[in-house]
Amino acid sequence: MNDKVDIREQSPAQIVAPNVRRTSRVREGLPYPLGATWDGLGVNFAIFSANATKVELCLFDEDGHREIERVELPEYTDEVWHGYLPDARPGTTYGYRVHGPYEPTAGHRFNPNKLLLDPYAKQLIGDLKWNPALFGYTLGSPDADLSFDERDSARFMPKCRVVESAFTWARARRPQIPWERTIIYETHLRGFTMQHPAVPKEFRGTFSGLMQHEVIEYIKNLGVTAVELLPIHAFVDDSYLVEKGLKNYWGYNSIGFFAPQPRYLATPFINEVKEMVSHLHDAGIEVILDVVYNHTAEGNELGPTLSFRGIDNASYYRLAPDPRYYINDTGTGNTVNLSHSRILQMVTDSLRYWAQEVQIDGFRFDLATILGREPHGFEEDGRFLDACRQDPALSQVKLIAEPWDCGPGGYQVGRFSPGWAEWNDRYRDTVRAYWKGDEGKLPELAARITASADIFNKRGRRPWASVNFVTAHDGFTLNDLVSYNEKHNEANGEDNKDGHDHNLSSNYGVEGPTDDPEIRSLRSRQIRNMLATLLFSQGTPMLLAGDEFARTQQGNNNAYCQDNEVSWIDWESIDEDGVELLEFTRKLIQLRQNLPILRRGRFLSGVYNEELDVKDVTWLTPAGDEMTPENWEDPNARCISILLDGRAQPTGIRRRGTDVTLLLILNAHNDVVKCTLPEVVGGETWMCHIDTNQPDLDAPAEFGFGKIYTVTAHSLLLFQLKPAKQPKPGKRKST
């Protein structure tokens, strides 16, 4: 007699529990660690649920198509259901059915007809297939989510797989790049290699694709120190996108915090992720993951039941005063409840897994304000932030917050705990507005390019806490920022109503591509201006992949659903101008790494040090005079010189420093400005490293003190002080 049920061949109504073999061979097991853990003899299964009345472990065939057995977990310890199967092993495919009250008005949404993913699953197989059976209530019912749906969801669900975590790491250690030397390169794992000619087709868009030699050599030769990957945790394609033939390309729709996204695996083995990390580490490149712990793919009360909702809705999510509904501080329908100790544990366990077992070097936290928000509001020393700060593993990796969300008091830039870095959107907006030519931007520009001390200089934080960026995945690329006045998101199927309208962009006369040589020249110079500003600013620079050769998304500033040529990097279309910009970007990065004064470990103050007879930074007018309050308040002033004096000691020790002295000139005027090169004690001449109007300078040109330099409209220059020659010491007389 064949007691296996092929759930592919039956309607949901035909899939009933009595047709599945049940077993009593399960042992008690342990309530820890959570998840499915192979110990060499069998597998321990443990899952948290404070409000369940029974938990069934569902075992499937290798492909996840047939449900073979249901095993009731026999023990309940400290709100953890657990059991041990001695004949289970790596490769075992499973899911859960959790019993309990279905009382949405009390916050409970248990429905054992719905197969659930293990929150701690290390690997998922199969795709989610949208179907009414995925919902705990009956779609179309007049009672909406208060109704109860009895259809089995198993055949439409991905399944979990037990894994063997052993992996032999290469001799190369973690790069451990100091924050001061860090340059972040934000990219999409799939989009970066989908059209790369050196990547075999079967590896494109996967972890295997990113570990290819030619890909890693490109990143290494660019000079960046870390790749920041958009979400690689398992996520779901939203049903409304699937209906339109689109996908959730960015991946901000997590359903598993331990498992990689299945479509990013070229092989059946999750160690492919570790291989990628190992190859990047061998090249001296760190790996930072963009992680989404603020919400899940289950949405609001009308969303599907895929995992957390069916395991213990009242524990996993923040519920409104009427617990039928969810607190929606994320704008996505639900908010993960990090105020609950077990949910906090899940998130920190996930981070430790990636940091220790996968050797990830850092994390960028999406909508991170939520992670620091307690029921009464945001706390800069909230439970999650404190948990990371004191954890021996997490406190040693790079932690980056996106310090805003759409909830009450959601904008918290500068308020995260010491040890955290933060995305600085005020830097982005100020640099964009300044180079666009907006009035009255000099005072704020001065603050932003000196690491935003007004925001971050407290509690012993360092300049690197400000993650500076002009572009990111969300918004225009740098090329589109200077090519479009308006967003062009028609391909998203939302009538161009999605995405930001406040882009601080300019097309300089023509919307989109043009053959006009003057407009093309100005656009190219503006791209170079913003790249140079980014890489010569104090703080941590973040570069969007493709900006180094002027990649375009045809004006789409919200390409979250464009898993196609709109978002993929087109390597073969890089033209001569793109190659020149790439070389220019490499030069900027090399200058930043070779000139420590551009990445100081202490905030610049501009305060005169009487003992050293020097200022660390001096702001000058085009005439070479120090800026006065009247100069700062002039709304028409758009040109400024910044003198970074290398004699100022960055460590606070009472002796002169030995860094080089630099002069940075920024001119956002529509016309040329004549700038006087100032005289500096101990120097002889100024050497020009960068003039964005002459990007192909081969060697520094020298200019004497007092020289009037004609600065082209919309351009940036970087000079280095050439020290005066010191007289050679005379020969000693013999005695």
Image: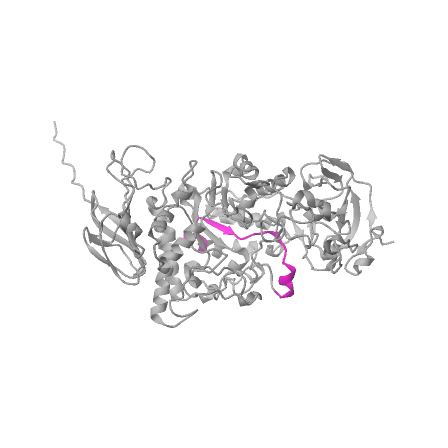
Q: Residue furthest bottom?
A: 515
Q: Where residue 419 sits in the image (x, y, percent)?
A: 47, 39
- Residue 276 visible in the current orientation: yes
* Quadrant in the rendering for residue 458: top left
Question: Is residue 166 left or right of 505 when viewed as pictured?
Answer: right
At x 39%, y 62%, the residue is 579
Residue at 65% x, 39% y: name it: 342
Towards the viewer: 39 or 142:
142
Q: Magenta includes 711?
A: no
Nearest the camera: 576 or 396?
Answer: 396
Q: Is residue 585 visible?
A: no
Number of numbered callouts drawn: 0
Name of the residue lying farthest toward the right: 1
Q: Position of residue 459 (x, y in %)?
A: 43, 36
Of 68 and 114, which appears nearest the observer? Answer: 114
Q: Quadrant of the C terminus?
A: top left
- Percent from the top left, x then y, of residue 568? 52, 62
Looking at this view, name the residue that lies furthest to the top.
735
- Taking the image as shown, residue 82 lies to the left or right of residue 512, namely right
Which quadrant holds residue 42? top right
Residue range of the region highlighted in magenta in the rendering: 218-245
User: With respect to residue 729, does 697 lie above or below?
Assistant: below
398 versus 4 height, above or below: above
Left or right: 13 in relation to 723: right
Residue 223 lies within the magenta run: yes
As drawn, 462 above or below 149? above
Question: Colour mode?
Answer: one colour
